[in-house]
Amino acid sequence: MKNRNVFLLALLAAVAAHAEESGGDFQRFLKETQLDLTLRSHWKYLKENEAQPKAVHNAWGAATTLDFRSGWLGDTLGFDASYTRAAKLAASDYFATRGILYNHGAGFDKSNAGGFSRFGQRYLKLKLGDDAFGLKAKGGWHQLKNVGVLTNTYRLSRNSYQGYSGSLRWQNLQLDMAWVTRSIMYDSPDSVHFLTLDGKEIDSILTGGLSWEKQNAVFSWAWGESKDYLRRHLLEITYPLTPKWALASQIYGSQALEKYKAMPQSKKQFNDSAWHYAGEVRWQDDSWIQKIGVAWTRAEKRNGVGYYDRYIGKNTRGRFNALTSAGKDYLRDGELALTSFTEYQFTESLASGIQVNYGQFSYKNNKIRTGEITWLNRWQPREGQLKDLTLAAQLGYGWSYKNINATPILNSAGEYQRSPSLSAEVGVTWKFGLL
């Protein structure tokens, strides 16, 4: 890590030296530089009893983030950084799984829940060429949004990765690559290694992807490997039939490598491979959006129910853009899932929708059925002093089953036990441009 930081500092010194020699260029550099302040509050609530006695997972926090984005020296070099300070507002006695507050101790007791501060991003950036044919690259700690098989997520902050990434674009075609060695998760200040499910370190993740986009038609293929642990493939396609109708499909797959095969069977999510296949029909006009999806998973596992895991190691976020995105739900071996999403745009700023998920699979003469109904709302003013404010809220009721690692716990009669749940979430984001 020291060698990498020395290299980045040396490159930054070279950028500064170049700036002194190019007065006019440096003036443009300053003019293009941006500094944003983002205020964020996020609350998540879940009441369930799937894997333990009935518990309430509740966490509420607030964060302030400064995002610095430099201009370009010589239209080629620059550097960005972001700093986040997050504070705890409230937490339940058992706050695990909410991904908002930092765990300062062992276990997930309320007394261990707290805030954090960290530099989530600090990297040098390079660009060559233009939008028609050009290269963009980053080196250092930075976020990866749908780069290869990796992505990020947003709670009080976003997770970031240490390493290098780049994209080469030629008209409508883009090639992405990334090589990363560590991460900082969205609810923590700590730089951590990627880990296997039994706690072994993963040296690095290498991933790449090819995408093509034209007139709302999108094709994306990506490949990635967490070294010696898992190999990942994905295919995402959207094809417009008419201005209002479109078809979409997603295919995601994982293949076991040496470190995964060497894990104890109890730690594995599947035997040798896991695949998730999804298809959607989409309809949209000026005010309405309607999506209907169907999905199926194959993830065979000895001694239990296997499932497709979106992540290719602990401390990562895996790219997954299907309607069945809901943790382990709807990703279990042999599970057929149906999804409907309906949204209505009441005004230019206000939208509200309903998502209904249903899944079923067989286990030891039981037809296991799960589902949820979620009401989603979004308010985002387009004009005036509040135009950079976003308020998102959702409320959901679900039904699942008591389980250990996705495998049903059967009662004395050999029947699975239903487990209802209630969830809610509110996120408020307000962004200000300081420069």
Image (tube, rainbow, N blue to C red):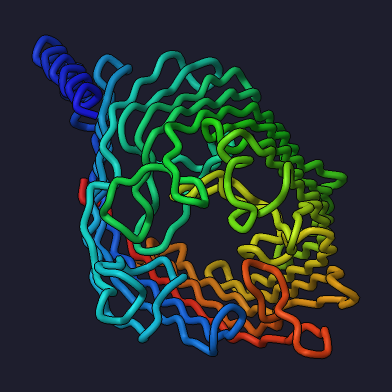
Q: Position of residue 142 (x, y in %)?
A: 36, 38
Is 223 displayed left or right of 412 in the figure? Answer: left
Residue occupying the point 44% across, 27% down: 165
In this rendered view, identify the residue nearer to me: 380 or 15.
Answer: 15
Up-down relation of residue 421 to residue 128 (above or below): below
- 51 vs 356, left or right, is left
Residue depicted at 64% across the width and 53% down the height? 265
Quarter of the view holding residue 236: top right
Q: Is residue 109 above or below residue 314?
A: below
Q: Is 257 located above or below residue 306 in the figure?
A: above
Q: How many marks?
A: 0
Q: Residue at x 55, y 26 (%)?
A: 176
At horizontal 28% and vertical 32% (from top left) the residue drawn is 123
How far across and how far down the image is residue 18, in percent? 16, 12
> Does residue 42 appear left or right of residue 368 in this picture?
left
Q: Residue furthest right?
A: 365
Horizontal relation, residue 413 to residue 76: left or right: right
The quarter of the rendered structure image containing the C terminus is top left
Question: Which corner quadrant of the image does residue 386 belong to?
Answer: bottom left
Q: Of residues 32 and 44, which is closer to you in this image?
A: 44
Q: Position of residue 334 (x, y in %)?
A: 84, 60
Q: Residue 277 versus residue 105: which sits nearer the camera? A: 105
Residue 12 picture quarter: top left
| 67 or 363, nearer to the observer | 363
Residue 140 in percent (x, y) is at: 30, 31
Q: Quadrant of the N terminus?
A: top left
